Every structure is written in structure tokens, then in C-alpha cells.
Image (cartoon, rainbow, N blue to C red):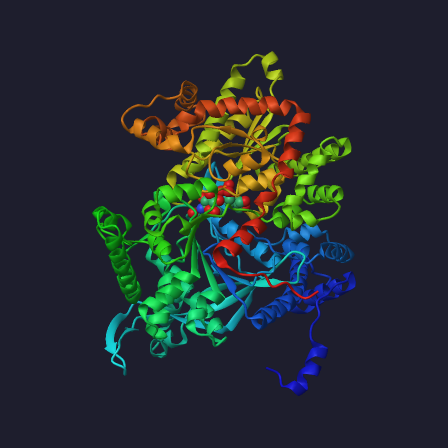
Amino acid sequence: SIPEGQREAWKKHSVQGFTTKEQFEDETVRHIETTLARSLFNCDELAAYSGAALAFRDRLIIEWNRTQQRQTFADQKRVYYLSLEFLMGRALDNAMLNVGLKDVARAGLKDLGFRIEDVISQEHDAALGNGGLGRLAACFLDSLATLNYPAWGYGLRYRYGIFKQEIVDGYQVEIPDYWLDFNPWEFPRHDITVDIQFYGSVRREKDEHGKTVMIWEGGEIVDAVAYDVPIPGYGTSTTNNLRLWSSKASKGEFDFQKFNSGEYEGSVGDQQRAETISAVLYPNDNLERGKELRLKQQYFWCAASLFDIVRRFTKTKKPWSKFPDMVAIQLNDTHPALAIVELQRILVDIEGLDWAEAWRIVQGTFGYTNHTVMPEALEKWSVPLMQNLLPRHLQIIYEVNAQFLQYVEKTFPKDRDMLRRVSIIEESQPKMVRMAFLATIGSHKVNGVAELHSDLIRTTIFKDFVTIYGPDKFTNVTNGITPRRWLHQANPRLSELIASKLGGYNFLTDLTKLNKLENFLDDANFKKEWQEIKHANKVRLAQHIKDTTGVSVNPKALFDIQVKRIHEYKRQQLNILGVIHRYLTIKSMSPEERKKLAPRVSIFGGKAAPGYWMAKTVIHLVCSVGEVVNNDKDVGDLLKVIYIEDYNVSKAEIITPASDISEHISTAGTEASGTSNMKFVLNGGLIIGTCDGANIEITREIGESNIFLFGNLAEDVEDLRHAHNYGDFQLDPDLNKVFEAIKGGRFGDAGRFSALCNSITEHGDYYLVSDDFNSYIKTHELVDEAFKDQEAWLEKCITSVARMGFFSSDRCIQEYAEMIWNVEPLPPKE
Ligand code: 4GP
Ligand code: PLP
């Protein structure tokens, strides 16, 4: 650091962030003219975005530095959130709002000749995630900073985020998302580089005290380089860090021998191989495909993060026994479960702790969040694969397992089969490492993400572990969302209207304050304004639909929206089959009957995993139905069917505020929580949904009369499936008519949809589409009826918003902090 004598000079020149419009303009123009080498003669909106973003980045980095210093001095426990996905979306708008300078920026940009909305929309989404799991991580970072927790996120800096989706002739086409061309929000830290080892072998040796030590040697080394992304809290100067690792060939790895002897391609090849590790995000949501590169990504990221965390701890010079008092690591799903093994390896092999002491530290440090009970999403890695890639880690897993099984055998001698059931190693061909069991055994708390889901994990996948450890190890933290992005940023007018009634924006940091809105249910002006805002949001979405699909939709129609990853369990197929039923019904109606109908726009959006053929078929069916319905003049405005391509966070910010009703219709027991359900309700839209995930708690909070629930309950699902498998299956008669229309070629070549139809009619209808069809259709009729009474509808919407306080991610983070991490916030000095 700088010697005492020079510190005054340093302080005099220390950079201060802008606060006024003039300073913002100075900074923006300076960046445009110098950093970007542009002038007022060639400054387009992209350059204006870049300049403004750099001005804000400078401001964030100052607070970021101060926050890091304060946290180091305070010497208290920190939280580390390990997530392979962070679905951040755009940063500029969020930074402006969180630091409270959006109005300054708006006025400054106007002076410089730009509209702030046009500038904001230049930014490329940071889309380092698939769906709910990644977006949850992003909301958590916002809440951690807002609540002043000393917290770091750790992830991978993918060169390619989730692919961009184009719909071409009604089919999904995937386009690579190279997003790093210009990313002002990251700081490369070439000084923070960690060597990561793969492959090689393990040798047993005696040290000077005669103790056996394990030496992992040989193999290859890849460098992990840190890139830091500042995360500003709302209404606080706390600015936390998201550290993303990028892979690079280790300097020792570049083969100069090859290079000098003219084998240029060979030496560059090694480099490229190393860089492949962090190149792409795997595009699977709720689906695992044990690819070696994915395991490599996981270890690369866990090892780099653990090295960093341990280095930060050792600087405090505290004894190892204090590690769990200073460090809480949360595992976002099992993707980072290797971190458990890596910490045990560091403590035993490198630091020389004895096994039992090390293991106590490990268990005291980790918490594990489960996000799914679906078998196809539970991670397993083949033992031979792990043996080859991480030989020492596999040994440690075997040792952890042996000690655990010994304990189980001693404690439950009568249940011999239990050992097979709970073993981390599945005795299959080849043997598999069950990551969820490893994560459970290596953590002190395991949580689900909504009440039903947490009950389900206790009674299904982790049932035996509840017997072994007792119920206290398993807990629930119902998911939440950040009201900053999902109300204030996405729906500024509604946020402003609410603030005008509640006397300010305090509800953004204490969302339960929304409950006062119920006092305004008789305020005619307030309600009128509310309705106008909803209408304006629908007009905005209608314009987006027109611009991107060419289809005109009537903003007065009921907007019925289902946007989320396309998955059979989320049942977009139920939705589109219901839409076909509606279409057939309209076609059969007399003009008089038609007059009574509320016009509808059925809006779909979401990506299918590139290898998930059935999901792609669903997209194709939606588009094919749209093609027919939207061109049927006889139907006109009564029904439109829209597919919005490339659903992502910034699209969600336009779509969410524009819904009248949104669909959260998973087969009961399959959707762990859902978070878009919360976003839609918070923006004054009602929902139609099954008794699944957080829909249940949303119902409890907002009241049964404000939600449209339908379908079988989770407790009945197994019996129904069982009955189907034994031939007890009757196709719903209305659904049969829908299938007849599809088979008759009404929506194009029926052959393209036969597998989808057969999955219901011939192959057991695993997702209970037929069982729930009737209740789904009937419930939509109730929606139609309810929408006709606009006054009553509006009251339901306002009441629901007023009762959504529970679903702030601030509440979740407080629960994690108290129940799982045992950490305290560190508020900045005023
Ligand atoms: C998702 C769950 O499917 C969703 O219900 C939940 O809201 C979200 O995690 C956050 O907890 N899971 C995934 C996944 O995205 O890939 O497993
Ligand atoms: N994808 C994006 C872009 C989102 O913004 C969200 C949540 O808002 C999700 C996926 C998760 O949606 P759901 O909870 O409906 O699965």
C-alpha cells in the first residue's frame, strides 16, 4: 500500500463519483470521446449507452472499493453464494435506480440529445442462466447488497450465455449469444489467477512425522482468471461483488517447444482447449446430461472459488476451527457440490488437519438449496468419469461415504436396505455419484424453495436422511423476487402511483408496506389511474408484438400469458390444447353467443433446450395454431395466439406488467416454487394455476377468491399415474375433439404433432394433461366471466398486490441469514 507520507496527496486526487447532472454529462462525454474514441459527429445510441454505462461503472467501483475495505476491517462472517447461473439481465437501468440517479441521467442524456429509454435498450442482456434458478440468484444478489450483507457471488464467466432464440417458419432456431463484445460492467483481475488441476494420479506418502499424506500429481493445469462485477444495493452505498471465473491456458501449459518447432496450431490448440471450459452455458433447465465438460466446469469454478475464499480467511490468521464462524457457503443446487469435497481436500491434504476435524468444519460451512425433485434433473456423475478427471476427489467421496454408511449401519442395524438407498454411490452400471446425497451429507442445512416443495423433499428424495439426521436439518425458504427490478424498474408508473399513495418508496425495501393499498379500494381516481397504467403496459406489449411478429392485437382484449422455459412439466401443451378448444368453441358459436365473449390474446414465450424434441414440438404447435387462428377473419379479435421469441429478462420486464392473467399450470408436485408467478401478481395481474410450488402460498397470502386454481392435487398424482400405467385411462372428451382437429390437419401436417398427442393418449399421460383438462377449461370460463366485471377484477388485482409483501427476496435473504448462515449485516456509515 501507499506509504503514510503520500496518502494525503493520494486522498486529494481520489476519484469521487458524480452526483449532479453536469458531472454526469462531463463523465459521459469524456468516456465517449476518450475511452470510446468517438465524437459528437459519430455518437449513436450505442455509444451514448456505452458512455453512460462507463460513467455509472466508475461510480459503482468507488463504492465497491469502499465496501470491500469496510468488510475487511469489520472482520465478520461473510456469505458466499455459489451458483453456476446468474441470469442478471441488463445492468444500466438497475444501477441508475439503485444509486438513485436515474433522473439525473435522464436529464443529462436529454441535454446530450438522447432519450433514456433508447439508451437503456441498447444494452445486451447478461444471460448467464437458463431460467428460474439463475434468476433467483440474481434477485438474491440484489437483496444481499440492499440489506448490507457482506456477501459475494461466485460463478462462471461464460463467453456464450443462453442461446438466442429465433422462430423461423414456426420452429425454434438457436443462435449463439456472444455477449462480451463490449461489457462495461466487468473488471478483469489478471492479478487474481488460480491454477486448477485436472486428471493425474494420487500417490500415498509418509510425511516427516510418519503420517500418511496423499499427493495429487500430474495431469493438466488450467488458469482461472477472476472477473468482478459490482452489485449495487438499493438505497445504500453497499456495493458487493460477483466474481466470475474465466478459463485460460496456464502459462506453463503453452507449449513453446511445439511453437518454436513450427507446430503453431498444436500449441494454440492447447490454449483453445483450456478456454473451452468457461466457453458455454449448458442450455438445460431442470435436466442434466452428464457431459465431461460440464463436470470440468463445475470443478474449475468450485476450486477457484474455494481457493479465493480460503485465501481471504487465512489472511485473518484465525485458527481453522473458526472457519465456519467466518464463512458461510450456500450451494445453489448440487452444481457446486464438489466444493464440499474440495474444502475437505484443502483442509486434509494441504493444511494437514485430521479428517474428523476437517469434516466438522466442512459441514459447518455449507448449506444446500434443492430446486427440484424431478428425477431427470437430479445430478449424478459416473464414477469412471470422476476417477479420471478428479482422482483424489473420488477417493474423498468414497471415504466420506464409508464413514457415513458406517454410522447408518450402526444406528439403523435393522434396515439393511437403507445402506443401498442412502449411499452416495449408486450401485449401477457404471456406478454413479449421487450429488444430491453428497450435498446433503456435507451441509448443515438443506432447504427447499416453497413449502410444498420442502415437504416433498422431506418425504421423497431425502426421506431416509430425515430419519438419519432428524427433521431439523431440513428447512424451507420460500423464494422471493426483488421488488426493485420487478416493480420499480419494470413498471415505473405503477411504482410511482403506489408511492404517491403510501407516502414514498419505502415499500421497495419493506414490501409488506404494500398492505396499506387496501385502504384505497374505494378511491375512484386511484383505481382509474391503476387501470390506465395497466392499459399503457398492454399497449407497449402490443407494440412489441406488432414489431416482432407483425400481428396486431387489441390491447383491450384479455392478455393471457405463459412465459417460462418450455417443459412438459410446466405444461404449455395443456395451454395450447386449451386454446385450440377455445378456437373450436368460437367457431361453433352463433354471432349472438360470440358477442358475449371477452376477446383474448394468448401469449407464449420461452426457450426449449436444444436437444429437447418434445418441447420444440410444443413451440411448433403454438406457432402453427397461431398461423391458423390469427388469419381466420371469422374469429377476428376474439382470439389471437402469439409466440414471443427469445424470452429473456429484459423481455420479461416488458411482458410481466402487461398481463391480465398469467399461467402457472405445472402438474402438481413438479414446480418447486416458480418465481414468475410472484412477478405477475406483484404487477397487478391475476393468475390461473395448479396447487403447486409457491402458488399455494400466493393463494394463502392474497386469498382464494383472487386466484384461479384448478387441477389435481400433488397427493393424487402418483395414484393417477399408477392407474394410467395399469390401463385405467380415459381421454377427456373435449380433449379428444381437440386431437381430432389436430389429426384432421387443421393446423398443418398432423404427423409433426403425433408424438405430442401420443404422449397423452398412448404413453400414460405422465403429466396428467387429460386428467386436468376439464377443470382447466372450466376455470378459464370463470376467468372469462370474471374479466367482464372490470370493477371487480380491478379490486382483485389491487388486493393481490397489497398482499404480496411476503414474496420479496429481502425476506428470503433474511431467513437464510438467520436460519442457515448466521450472518449479520454491515450497514455503511451515514
Ligand atoms: C427452478 C425450479 O424449477 C423453479 O420452480 C424454482 O422457482 C427455481 O428453480 C428457483 O428456485 N429450477 C431450475 C433448475 O431452474 O434448473 O433446476
Ligand atoms: N426466465 C426468465 C427470463 C425470468 O425472468 C424468470 C422469472 O421471472 C424465469 C425464467 C422463471 O420463470 P418461472 O418461475 O415461471 O419458471
Q: How many marks?
A: 0
Describe residue 91's horizontal placement relative to residue 436 as left or right: right
Describe residue 823's horizontal placement relative to residue 432 as left or right: right
Depth check: give the residue in front, 87 or 501.
Answer: 501
Depth check: give the residue in front, 324 or 386.
Answer: 324
Q: Quadrant of the N terminus?
A: bottom right
Q: Which residue: 71% across, 49% down?
A: 505
Q: Compared with residue 283, is residue 712 higher up or lower down, i.e. above or below? A: above
Residue 295 in picture, x, y percent from top left: 35, 58
Q: Compared with residue 11, is residue 583 higher up or lower down, i.e. above or below? A: above
- Which residue is farthest bottom? 5
Q: Quadrant of the C terminus?
A: bottom right
Q: Which residue: 25% across, 80% down?
A: 210
Q: Can I make out residue 224 in this image?
A: no
Q: Can I make out residue 779 in this image?
A: yes
Residue 145 in picture, x, y percent from top left: 59, 59
Depth check: give the residue in front, 411 or 571.
Answer: 411
Q: Which residue: 43% across, 31% down?
A: 713
Residue 513 in picture, x, y percent from top left: 67, 44
Residue 556 in picture, x, y percent from top left: 66, 28
